[in-house]
Image (cartoon, rainbow, N blue to C red):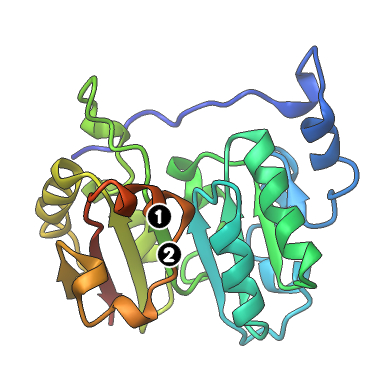
Amino acid sequence: MDRPLRPQINVTENLPNQNAYTLALNGEYKDFAFDEIRALNNKGLWRKILSLPTDAAVDLEIGTGNGVFFAYQASQNSKRGLVGLELKYKPLVQSIRRARKVGCTNAAIARFHAFNLDQLFESQEINNVFIHFPDPWTSPKKPKNRLTNSWFLDMIYDLQKPNSFLNFKTDSLELFDWSLEEIKKTKYEIIFQTYDLHQSEMKTQNFVTGFEKLFTAKGIKTNFVRLYKK
């Protein structure tokens, strides 16, 4: 699949009607939450921004939602950095607020479109990547917008350090099967996959997100795959 044109998003400072969340992004949380313009200055500098050693790992969560996993992951891995991406203002601020509330100084977040990830990170700047329950784009069907298309996975691969993994989970069977076909076109190695994460050997390592709880309560299984960059 060819790369589409770079997507454009609204510039926060140009919004005619600011609210508490847009103001917090460039106000209260400006030192560790970055809008789509300021984030561009961080390329190659994330470890410095997070006050981490130059050899520290920096992981990435694409689509933090309200930040429950984001805060958990940062709090459980204090020697690793964690950068989150989120487009919607309210969950973005909720995410960084949760992380800071539990004392995480190793986390930062950016309002940035994932398809422009190469503008945000240098080659081999990041380590592990988490993509949890993204929009499946099943109605209308727009596969080019899916985060697990082959060209985007190849981009992530190039931005990751060797010996890193990518975790992807979704409740959408259609998206999962489609993603597995796309993964075959990439350089990643699949080291684990399941159509029922909660009944797999990986279940003890899984943090159950809010989406997961809702889906599980309805009897919907969680599909999961871990990809590996040698």
Q: Give the side of residue 225 with respect to residue 55, left or right.
A: left
Q: Quadrant of residue 102?
A: bottom right
Q: Quadrant of residue 164?
A: bottom left
Q: Quick one: label 2 or label 1, which is nearer the N terminus?
A: 2
Q: Secondary structure at mark 1?
A: helix
113 over 211 or under it: above or below: above
**Camera sees residue 13:** yes
Q: Amino acid at mark 1?
A: Lys
Q: Residue furthest top?
A: 16
226 over 97 or under it: above or below: below
Image coords of residue 217 (percent x, y): 33, 51
Image coords of residue 137 (percent x, y): 28, 31
Residue behind mark 1: 213
Relative depth, front residue between 46 and 68: 68
Image coords of residue 29 (percent x, y): 84, 50
Residue behind mark 2: 208
Q: Residues within 10 Å of mark 1 (few under 14, many from 20)?
A: few
Do the CB atoms of the residues marked 2 and 1 lie less than 8 Å apart?
Answer: yes
Q: Give the side of residue 33 with respect to residue 143, left or right.
A: right
Quarter of the picture holding the C terminus: bottom left
Q: Give the side of residue 196 with respect to residue 206, left or right.
A: left
Q: Residue at x 60, y 54 (%)?
A: 67
Q: Residue at x 78, y 31 (%)?
A: 22
Q: Residue at x 83, y 31 (%)?
A: 20
**Camera sees residue 190:** no
